[in-house]
Image (spheres, grey):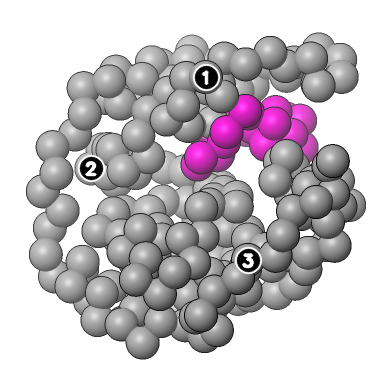
């Protein structure tokens, strides 16, 4: 069955009481985990493809899964170049027979760890025009705050990436926390219900078909005056 996804159940019904403390700690203490060589090589290859295509404004599709969102972003923004990143080779290399028509020519997929990718982009000051974090694992247990992206040590690098940054989820607590964490690092954000005309990911399609309310957080940097 397709439209059979259960809503997220959690004892946590509001933003985590330790969120501000956790974000402040990650801002104060550098993240010292070594960069993985596999991720470094994969990102280097993806950035080389971007440069070879002319260096158009860059879109990062973070955690792209099977890559549908990467293709839809490439189609929606033909004057941009999209890098879709996922850690799973199986998801990235799975057949794409669900895609109708020719694949866009303004994208590339990279098998890499996002924890490495966000830090490399920040370190090397790679300008990202648009950054999407679509339906990340919500880790809904109260003790799982540190596994959510906004509670992870990599969050300052994530938040630095993208003039336009959007996160979507079917759990409003996740979106509220994400927006609050962005504000704590100096990126005002808005949250709002989300009603996609065309789903961008298999999860978005399944959640919508299952009747789940969807939410998004959007943060846009102001252009220099």
Secondary structure found at label 1: helix
| Disc 2 from disc 1: Cα separation | 29 Å
Question: Which residue is under mark 2?
Answer: 123
Give the x, y percent position of residue 89. Answer: 47, 19
Number of the front mark, 3 or 1 = 3
| Quadrant of the drawing holding the N terminus | top right
Sequence-wise, which precedes: disc 2 or disc 3? 3
Say which mark, if any, is on residue 90: 1
| Disc 3 from disc 1: Cα separation | 26 Å
Front one among 219 and 36: 36
Q: In this view, does 165 lie above or below 55?
A: below
Sequence-wise, which precedes: disc 3 or disc 1? 3
> What is the magenta range?
57-82
- 69 is within the stretch colored magenta: yes
Number of the front mark, 2 or 3 = 3
Residue 169 sits in which quadrant?
bottom right
């Amino acid at each position: 069955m397709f439209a059979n996804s259960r809503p997220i159940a959690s004892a946590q019904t509001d933003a985590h009481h330790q969120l501000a403390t956790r974000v402040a700690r990650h801002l104060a203490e550098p993240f010292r985990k070594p960069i993985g060589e596999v991720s470094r090589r994969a990102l280097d290859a993806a950035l080389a493809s971007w440069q070879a295509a002319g260096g158009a404004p860059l879109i990062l599709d973070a955690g792209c899964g099977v890559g549908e969102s990467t293709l839809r972003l490439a189609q929606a923004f033909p004057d941009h170049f999209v890098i879709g990143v996922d850690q799973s080779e199986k998801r990235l290399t799975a057949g794409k027979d669900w895609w109708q028509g020719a694949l866009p020519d303004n994208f590339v997929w990279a098998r890499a760890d996002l924890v490495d990718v966000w830090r490399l982009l920040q370190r090397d000051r790679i300008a990202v025009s648009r950054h999407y974090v679509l339906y990340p694992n919500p880790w809904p247990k109260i003790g799982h705050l540190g596994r959510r992206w906004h509670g992870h040590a990599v969050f300052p690098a994530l938040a630095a990436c993208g003039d336009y940054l959007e996160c979507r989820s079917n759990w409003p607590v996740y979106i509220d926390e994400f927006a609050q964490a962005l504000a704590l690092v100096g990126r005002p954000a808005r949250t709002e219900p989300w009603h996609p005309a065309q789903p961008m990911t298999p999860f978005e399609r399944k959640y919508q078909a299952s009747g789940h309310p969807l939410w998004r957080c959007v943060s846009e940097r102001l252009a220099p005056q």
